[in-house]
Image: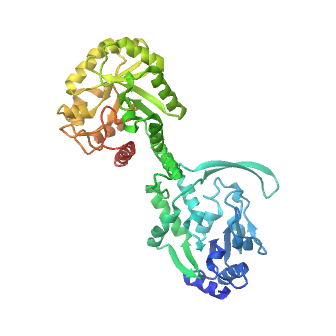
Amino acid sequence: MDRKTIAEGLRSLGLKKGSIVLLHSSFLSLGQVKKGPPEVIKAFLDVLGDKGTLMVPAFGQLGVLVEEVKNLPGAVISSCPLGTVAACGPDAGELCADHWKADTAHGKDTPYTRLADKGGSICLLGVDQDRNTSLHSVEALLKLPYLSTVSRTFQTPEGKEVTKEYHFFPGPHRDFIGLDRLLTDAGVMKTARIGNAQVRLIDSAGMFETLLAVGAQRPDFVLCDNPECADCVKQRAALHADAYAKESFRLAASARLAGRYVPEIIENLQRESISAVELDFLQGKACWMLPADRLAAAIQEFAGEGITVSALRLPMVPDDSLKLLSLLKEIKLKRVVLPVQGAASLAKTLDGAGIEVSLANDIQTARSAAADLMTVRMEVPGVSFTFNPVNFTRAGEHPFLYSYKTGRFIKTIRQLDIADCTWDGQETPFARGNSEIKELISILRCGNFSGWFVLGGGAPYPGPLADAAENFRNLLASM
């Protein structure tokens, strides 16, 4: 294969005199080329002509063709220590100008976005989308939460040493190779074979338009769905954390839903970017019945991984209030959730010791729960209400249409258990039963509810935490 054959292949893809192209390449992918790497670059220059510009990434050891371009007479190398490019042609100076001054290495005011502004193309010669640096530009323009800020110390073109931060910088693995079909279907990418190499030519502006629209709707669009890919799991968690940070509520999951053992619970919570746990059951046993030292060790292990405990939850009101109080003091926990029925004396004892008490409805009517709560609050005004929609459903009531309004719980609610079931008590995914959980979430968000939403609080979920968390996020997205 020679220079002429390569040039013909490039023209067949749409390159022509005056084109501006960013080349990502593997020389070896072409097969045998007469006279070696210089002939490939000459073929590009033959096609582009005197008015065209050839640009390559130059931020590392990226192959012999990159070195050929860097060594061309008149080649310009951009001044940014990250995302550096080299270019040759009449537009080289404008493409590379003041790259170091940009806020990001790949976003606005960088060679990558300027290429699109000038109607340029991206050529992937024998490499796939994983080598398409402009995809980092898409991420930077979207300001995706999993990107990071990095700092570099370097010399400016004037010789001054500066230390500068670059925002929205890419990190580990992404599933860029999955974008081929999307770009082809959008009509912004053509493919052809030159020698042994599969060559893609992408309209840069069209790529940005297509992927920015997709990314605005699906910020995880370049993350793979492999649960064993630690990079994408971590980056997806950053997306979840960003979404939750925009909400007024605090989110926790019940320990029973999150897993059986503490390390398992921690891993599952971190995967879903949930930073709080309600201690109801560990290893199948009620947490409040565990030895204090064992429970304290669990709480310490959670804290070491950045997970707070939202409350200790009891399934019943214990006879020995002093035993519970002693446990809470020993494990240094200041919030407890327990049933409202028969809780007056215990609530008074706990409140007197500085423990925050939230009382949850059992399987009872709204009027009954409201009366029980009022009885307690007459003695302990600071007691709040934990609204469990599943128990109201099991009592035969519509939790939102009837229970919430009849009990006037809007005044006292500090926790909503995120759970659902059918009229006969069968647990279901959220918004697939009769507990009107979607409506309850919505009305509380309308008032910028600052209390707790607890996934699986006070009721089982028919699946693992990952399913429940996705179910919950989908509910939020549908509102």
Q: Quadrant of residue 426?
A: top left
Q: Is residue 424 left or right of residue 348?
A: left
Residue 345 in the image: above or below residue 218: above
- Residue at 62% across, 64% down: 112
The image quadrant where one finds the N terminus is: bottom right
Q: Is residue 253 visible?
A: yes
Q: Is residue 92 left or right of residue 436?
A: right
User: In this orientation, which residue lies closer to the viewer: 85 or 276?
Assistant: 276
At which x and y percent is residue 193?
Answer: 55, 81
- Residue at 26% across, 43% down: 428
User: In this orientation, which residue lies closer to the viewer: 331 or 349?
Assistant: 331
User: In this orientation, which residue lies closer to the viewer: 152 or 40?
Assistant: 40
Residue 359 in the image: above or below residue 319: below
Q: Is residue 5 left or right of residue 64?
A: left
- Residue at 45% across, 20% down: 292
Residue 431 in the image: above or below residue 448: below
Q: Quadrant of residue 87?
A: bottom right
Question: What color scheme is it?
Answer: rainbow
At which x and y percent is residue 268?
Answer: 44, 41
Q: Quadrant of residue 334?
A: top left
At which x and y percent is residue 182?
Answer: 45, 67
- Residue at 46% across, 16% down: 329
Q: Is residue 380 visible?
A: no
- Number of labelled discs? 0
User: In this orientation, which residue lies closer to the viewer: 427 or 294?
Assistant: 294
At which x and y percent is residue 146?
Answer: 54, 49
